[in-house]
Image (spheres, rainbow, N blue to C red):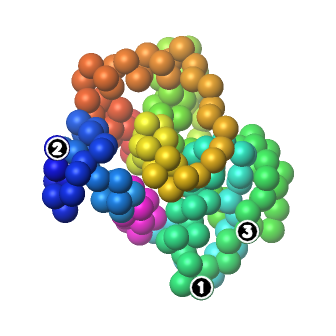
Amino acid sequence: MACIKCSRTAKIDLKHLGGSLCPSCFAEVIEKRVRKSLRDNKWLKPADKILYIDDGTLQSKVGIYLIKAIFQNQPFNIDFKKGTIKSADKLSKGYNKVLIPWNLDDEIEQYLDALFNAKKVPKTKHIKLLINISHEEISYFAKIKKIKGRQKTKSKLGKMLDSLEKRYPGSKFGLLRSISP
């Protein structure tokens, strides 16, 4: 099987990508998706004092890797602190922007949990860095870049979403588009 971008041997076959990719092209696609999300949403400016919450999970470590890759030659002031997403408000004193390791699966799960339990979807002022990246893509990216971190445990809802995605490729991205303002 050949990579759809460069014709090298493809090792990653995710149906929603439109074909198979080699590891380096896959990593490039993920990084470009995060860059595009930051640029299109105009989330960050060089004058911002930015905090990234590192909760020790694999997605958090991938987020750190991507931030360092994206902002390595740019005049951004980004600090990294260990903590949880729930402790972000306490840790963020003195910062005007807070990045959290929140991915596509987390966003959909939170929305569906609120929907199924007749609750309001909690609003957050934090920037969800990995919102356009699925848990599966984060795992592949971490494997390619040799990033270590602990895996988050999946809830029943998360497992249900995974089986839905397996049966209907691209359904997670479709759900995200449906719930995003």
Left or right of 156 in this view: 4: left
Instruction: Look at mark 2 in the image and give the residue it sits on.
Output: 1
Query: Is residue 167 in view from this perspective?
Result: yes
Which quadrant is home to the N terminus? top left
Q: x and y percent of residue 72 in the render?
A: 56, 78
Alpha carbons under labels 2 and 1: distance apart: 41 Å
Alpha carbons under labels 3 and 1: distance apart: 13 Å
Q: Is there a contact, CB below 8 Å, between mark 2 and mark 1?
A: no
Label 1, residues with CA under 10 Å away: few <14, some 14-19, many ≥20: few
Q: Nearer the viewer, residue 51 or 59?
A: 59
Instruction: Look at mark 3 in the image and give the residue it sits on.
Output: 79
Which one is earlier in the sequence, the residue at label 2 or at label 3? 2
Which residue is at 54% across, 29% downward?
Answer: 110
Which quadrant is home to the C terminus? top left
Residue type highlighted by circle 1: Pro
Which residue is at 71% across, 54% downward?
Answer: 53
Is 40 part of what is drawn in magenta? yes
Q: x and y percent of residue 69 in the render?
A: 52, 70
Instruction: Look at mark 1 in the image and give the residue it sits on.
Output: 75
Q: x and y percent of residue 109 in the render?
A: 50, 27
Residue type highlighted by circle 3: Asp
Alpha carbons under labels 2 and 3: distance apart: 42 Å
Q: Which residues are magenta?
A: 29-41
Left or right of 25 in this view: 94: right
Tell me the element at label 2: loop
Work out whether 92 lies above or below 155. below
Left or right of 160 in this view: 125: right
Work out whether 96 lies above or below 168. below
Tell me the element at label 3: strand
